[in-house]
Amino acid sequence: MRRVAVSLPPAIDMSRSPRRTAVVFALVVFVSGPAASPAAAQSQQQIDWCTNLAHEVSPDQQISGCTAVIQSHSWGGHGLAWAFNDRGFAYYLKRDLDSAFADFEQAIRLDPKDAVAFNNRGLIYQAKDNLDRAIADYDEAIRLDPTYVFAFNNRGNAYMDKNDYNRAIADYGEAIRLDPAFAVAVGARGKAYLAKGEFDNAIADFTVAIRLNPHDTASLNDRCRAYGTKGDFDRALSDCGESIRLDPNKPGSFFLRGNLYQDKGDLDRAVADYTEALRLAPNYAAALYLRGK
C-alpha cells in the first residue's frame, strides 16, 4: 500500500465487495495524481470534499466536490482520473452502480495504467454478478501492480462467489503474504477453508483474524461454526457468546448459538436464542421454523 504526501487528492480504493464475503469496507488512500496547486475554477473545499481524506463528508458532498473538479476543466489525463475514481467511489456507497461504473470507465480511459480504476470497476462487475468480467479487471489491476494487496483480496472474493475455493485461498494467501496484518484477507481465507471442510485450517485463520482485530464478530461466529461442526461445543459457545457480547444486535449470532444449544440437547436455551433472533428480525424464517420444531 503506497502512501505519498502530495497536495492533489488521491483516488479511493475499495477493497471489499459488499457481497457475501464482506466483513468491513476497508478503504485505502491511494495517490494517483501529481502534486499541483488548486485551480481557481474550483475551491479548496470542493477538492477536499472530493478526496474525503478523513472520510467525514457524505457521498453527496463527495460527488458534488468531484463534479466541480471535473467540470472545471483544470485537470487532465492522470490528474483527472483521481476525480472520477473518487466520484465513482461515492456513487458506489450510494449503490448507484451504473454511475460508479461510468466514472471508473472514464478513469481507465484517462489513465489505462491506473490499477485502482481497474480494481474499482471490477467491484462494480462483481456487484452486478458478472464475475468473469470482475476477475478480468482484477487480473489487469494485478498485472499493472503485482503488489496490489486489495486486488488479490477482491479477486479472491470473486472466486469465492464462483465457489472456486482453491483459487480463492491462493489469492487470499498472496494478499496475506504481501500484508500479514490484513485481517480481512485472513478471515476471508478462513471462510474459504470452512467452505472446503478444512476446519483446522479455518480455525487457524479465524484465530489470527481475531488476534489482529479482537472485535471481528464475523470471524468469531465463523470460528464458532467451525468448532461446532467439529463437535467442540464448549469452544464454539464461547466464541458465539463473545460475538454476542461485542454486538448484541445481530440476529444471526443468536441463531447460530441456538443451533449449537439444539445440537447439545439444551432446548430451553435454544428456544431462548431463536426467540431473541426473532425479536431482532421478526421475519427470520429459519429461526421461526427451528423454534417450533
Image (cartoon, rainbow, N blue to C red):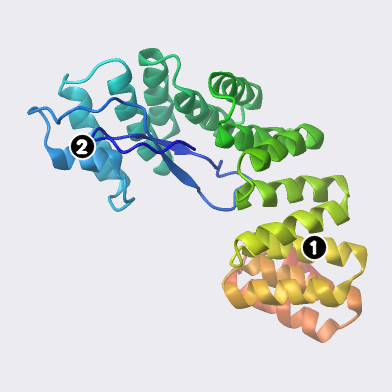
Q: Which residue is found at the position 62% from the left and 21% from the top?
A: 139
Q: Which residue is found at the position 35% from the left and 14% from the top?
A: 110
Residue 272, picture quadrant: bottom right
Element type where label 2 sits in the image: helix
Name the quarter where the C terminus is drawn.
bottom right
**Residue 47: mark:** 2
Element type where label 1 sits in the image: helix
Query: Which is more toward the observer, 285 or 99?
Result: 99
How packed is label 2: few (under 14 Cα within 10 Å), some, or many (20 or more)?
A: many
Residue 82, how many percent across, how many down?
A: 33, 28
Which residue is the site of mark 1? Answer: 225
Q: Which residue is found at the position 88% from the left and 50% from the top?
A: 198
Query: Which is more toward the observer, 29 or 225?
Result: 29
**Residue 85: mark:** none
Q: Earlier in the sequence, mark 2 or mark 1?
A: 2
Query: Which is more toward the observer, 194 or 37?
Result: 37
Q: CA distance from mark 2 to mark 1?
A: 46 Å
Residue 15, how many percent across, how many down?
A: 53, 40
Residue 125, how many percent across, how many down?
A: 55, 27
How packed is label 1: few (under 14 Cα within 10 Å), some, or many (20 or more)?
A: many
Residue 246, picture quadrant: bottom right
